Image (cartoon, grey):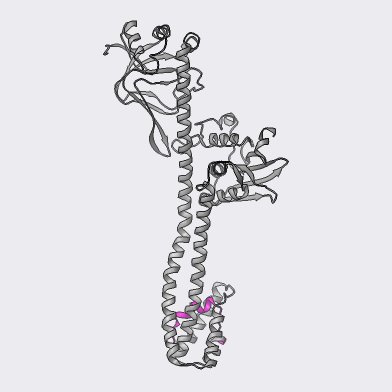
């Protein structure tokens, strides 16, 4: 049914001219509300109005006061939110559905951009009519309550997933940075190791052709063993002097001084070289030195590869433990201390970028507790990440865990600017954030609160006036069945 528009505009759409019977017919055909008793639909007709939204017209925006129940008769309304600098479509409402402000909703202001994607006819009921709506239209009210619950469930699921993906994205960026250094080191060492093995093989062939006696072979083996031992670290000046001294010794015997650096690393002295030269001369001496130096280099490079790959394994294992990606989503014994250590490890890059210190203070008697490990790790991640955001360059974050009676208390303390008094009551509210637009969703602490409540625990915080110390404290029962006794 096409209706003419009057000249009267509202902040959200143009009022349409229509008789009560025409409006009643359109509401009766509505998929969600059309099955309501006629008298309830007539109540709607008497207390609302038809409006037409032009294509592209803005229906709502972050901060706008929410006052209107919107019954979509034709067209489509889309909800967009800005997340991490990008604009994303998070929901869409079509003809036959109801959106906007519902009766009993606690929503005061919008948190999203809401736009009519095409020309859309709507029926609007204002907030000031809700008392009469809930009193005189019980079936319509029940339908709207169900719609509100469904919408809340949808947004909750989407918000949880988005926040988890954002957290994972930040962790992944840090992890990629942390993995790059050991991976590059392992690659460089593996390449150099190939060169050392090639030198070993070439020197071995020369020594084999020299047909040395047992005494000479024993002296070479003793020299090689000396080269395999890590030397005491030298200061730069002493190291430079020793390297120059060994290079001169090699040059004097027409031996390539490329082995000098490896010999210095092994702490070889010219006296030890003299002992070797006392029983072997010529090409055999040069080959023995190259062989020993290459052996030393190969051992050192193998150690570097082992150290680098161990670091990679440590980081990957931390991610696996942090995400519980191979574990069922059920409560099971959770190593709280390991979870805190893994979280701090995965946030190392962020701390380093701010020249921040993160101190772990975990008591020896902290027990395992029955918990959903992935959820609690998300709690630690959000709290520590927020603390790192709050501190300045060179700041300090302390993470503590200790047993207290029948509970384990985990504290995250920072020396940042603190939480202003006027927002302390709001920080756990969904979508509330003090971060710049596009950087924070306002869901981090809401997720923390819900995860803590899921474990029948509690979270509290205190922040010194004027900054200097803010502490978030999570009190977890050691036995989940006693969480309500804290």
Quadrant placement of the N terminus = top left
Name which residue lies at 62% across and 50% down: 359
Q: Main secondary structure of the magenta part?
A: helix
Residue 480, position as x, y percentages in the image: 65, 38
State whether residue 229 is above or below residue 387: below
Q: Which range is magenta? A: 254-271
Q: Nearer the viewer, residue 357 or 124?
A: 124
Q: Nearer the viewer, residue 365 or 274?
A: 365
Asked whether residue 29 is drawn in magenta, I would say no
Residue 204, position as x, y percentages in the image: 44, 84
Residue 104, position as x, y percentages in the image: 51, 18
* Residue 254 visible, this orientation: no
Q: Nearer the viewer, residue 260 or 43?
A: 43
Q: Quadrant of residue 31?
A: top left
Name which residue lies at 56% across and 78% down: 267
Quadrant placement of the C terminus = top right
């Amino acid at each position: 049914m096409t209706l003419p528009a009057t000249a009267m505009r509202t902040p959200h759409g143009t009022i349409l001219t229509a008789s009560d019977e025409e409006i009643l017919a359109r509401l009766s055909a509505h998929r969600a509300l059309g099955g309501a008793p006629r008298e309830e639909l007539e109540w709607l007709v008497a207390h609302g109005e038809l409006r037409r939204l032009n294509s592209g017209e803005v229906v709502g925006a972050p901060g706008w006061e929410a006052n209107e129940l919107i019954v979509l008769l034709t067209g489509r309304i889309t909800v967009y939110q800005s997340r991490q600098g990008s604009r994303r479509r998070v929901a869409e409402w079509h003809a036959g559905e109801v959106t906007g402000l519902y009766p009993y909703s606690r929503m005061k202001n919008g948190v999203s951009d809401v736009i009519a994607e095409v020309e859309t006819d709507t029926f609007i009921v204002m907030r000031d009519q809700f008392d009469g709506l809930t009193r005189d239209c019980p079936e319509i009210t029940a339908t709207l309550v169900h719609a509100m619950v469904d919408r809340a469930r949808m947004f909750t699921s989407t918000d949880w997933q988005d926040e988890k993906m954002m957290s994972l994205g930040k962790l992944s960026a840090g992890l990629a940075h942390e993995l790059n250094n050991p991976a590059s080191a392992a690659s460089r060492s593996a390449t150099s190791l190939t060169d050392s093995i090639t030198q070993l093989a070439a020197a071995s062939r020369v020594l084999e052709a020299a047909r040395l006696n047992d005494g000479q072979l024993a002296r070479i083996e003793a020299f090689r063993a000396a080269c395999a031992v890590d030397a005491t670290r030298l200061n730069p000046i002493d190291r430079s002097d020793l390297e120059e001294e060994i290079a001169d010794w090699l040059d004097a015997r027409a031996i390539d001084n490329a082995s000098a650096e490896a010999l210095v690393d092994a702490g070889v002295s010219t006296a030890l070289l003299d002992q070797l030269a006392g029983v072997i001369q010529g090409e055999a001496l040069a080959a023995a030195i190259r062989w020993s130096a290459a052996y030393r280099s190969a051992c050192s490079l193998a150690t570097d590869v082992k150290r680098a790959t161990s670091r990679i394994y440590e980081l990957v294992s931390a991610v696996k433990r942090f995400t519980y990606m191979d574990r069922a989503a059920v409560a099971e014994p959770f190593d709280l201390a390991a979870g805190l250590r893994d979280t701090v490890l995965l946030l190392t890059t962020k701390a380093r970028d701010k020249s921040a210190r993160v101190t772990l203070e975990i008591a020896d008697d902290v027990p395992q507790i029955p918990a959903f490990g992935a959820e609690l790790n998300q709690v630690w991640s959000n709290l520590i990440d927020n603390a790192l955001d709050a501190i300045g360059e060179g700041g300090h974050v302390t993470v503590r865990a200790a047993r207290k009676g029948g509970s384990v208390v985990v504290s995250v303390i920072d020396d940042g600017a603190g939480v202003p008094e006027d927002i302390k009551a709001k920080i756990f509210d969904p979508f509330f954030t003090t971060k710049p637009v596009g950087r924070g969703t306002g869901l981090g602490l809401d997720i923390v609160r819900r995860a803590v409540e899921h474990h029948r625990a509690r979270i509290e915080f205190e922040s010194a006036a004027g900054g200097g110390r803010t502490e978030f404290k999570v009190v977890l029962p050691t036995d989940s069945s006693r969480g309500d006794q804290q």
